[in-house]
């Protein structure tokens, strides 16, 4: 059976959320976690039907690479939404991914509000 590219749905078009000054980030293949934790997460993702996360990126990409049927990610960084969309589009996956933009205003590293 042929695999299809992941579909990423956002409440608004990611392109409209990313300002001209933001660069779309490259999304890591793996979560930013210790290897033992990534192995634990991967083991759990193999048996799950739906993965809900706050903050997208490497964990989203990992879940999609394992064909988790439904992925829901809440992301505060509009540029990251576009980066995740591009990363998942390059994967051959059966996952359906919904990315919800939690608009916290301008963000800094790891999606923290700039005025935090």
Image (spheres, rainbow, N blue to C red):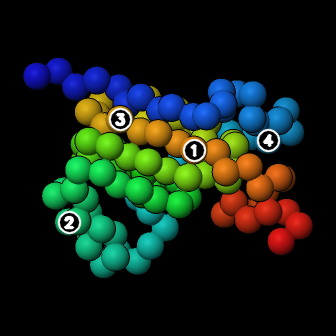
Which badge, 1 or 4, is on the more N-terminal residue? 4
The answer to whether residue 112 is left or right of residue 51 is right
The answer to whether residue 66 is left or right of residue 58 is left
The answer to whether residue 46 is left or right of residue 81 is left
Residue at x 25%, y 59% (from the top left corner): 45
Residue beneath label 4, please?
Answer: 22
Badge 4 marks a residue whose secondary structure is loop
Which badge, 3 or 2, is on the more N-terminal residue? 2
- For label 2, count other residues whose C-alpha is less than 10 Å away and answer few (under 14), some (14-19) or many (20+): few
Residue beneath label 3, please?
Answer: 96
Which badge, 3 or 4, is on the more N-terminal residue? 4
> Which quarter of the figure is the N terminus placed in?
top left
On the image, the x and y values in percent for residue 3 come to 22, 25
Judge depth for marks 4 and 2 and give the one in front.
2
Judge depth for marks 1 and 4 and give the one in front.
1
Badge 1 marks a residue whose secondary structure is strand
- For label 1, count other residues whose C-alpha is less than 10 Å away and answer few (under 14), some (14-19) or many (20+): many
On the image, the x and y values in percent for residue 79 come to 69, 42
Residue beneath label 2, please?
Answer: 43
Please report contact status of discs 3 and 1: CB closer than 8 Å, yes or no.
Answer: no
Residue beneath label 1, please?
Answer: 100
Task: State the CA–CA distance, disc 3 to disc 2.
Answer: 20 Å
On the image, the x and y values in percent for residue 8 come to 47, 32
Task: State the CA–CA distance, disc 3 to disc 1.
Answer: 13 Å
Residue 3 badge:
none
Badge 3 marks a residue whose secondary structure is strand
On the image, the x and y values in percent for residue 98 come to 47, 39
Residue at x 37%, y 31% (from the top left corner): 6
Task: State the CA–CA distance, disc 4 to disc 2.
Answer: 35 Å
Eyeballing the image, is 104 above or below 99?
A: below
């Amino acid at each position: 059976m042929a695999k299809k590219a992941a579909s990423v749905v956002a409440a608004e078009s990611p392109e409209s959320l990313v300002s001209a000054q933001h660069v779309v980030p490259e999304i890591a293949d793996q979560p930013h976690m210790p290897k033992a934790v990534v192995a634990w997460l991967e083991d759990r993702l193999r048996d799950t039907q739906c993965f809900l996360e706050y903050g997208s990126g490497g964990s989203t990409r990992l879940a999609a690479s394992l064909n988790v049927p439904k992925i829901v990610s809440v992301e505060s960084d509009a540029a990251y939404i576009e980066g995740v969309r591009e990363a998942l589009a390059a994967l051959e996956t059966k996952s359906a991914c919904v990315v919800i933009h939690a608009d916290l205003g301008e963000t800094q590293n790891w999606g923290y509000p700039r005025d935090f």
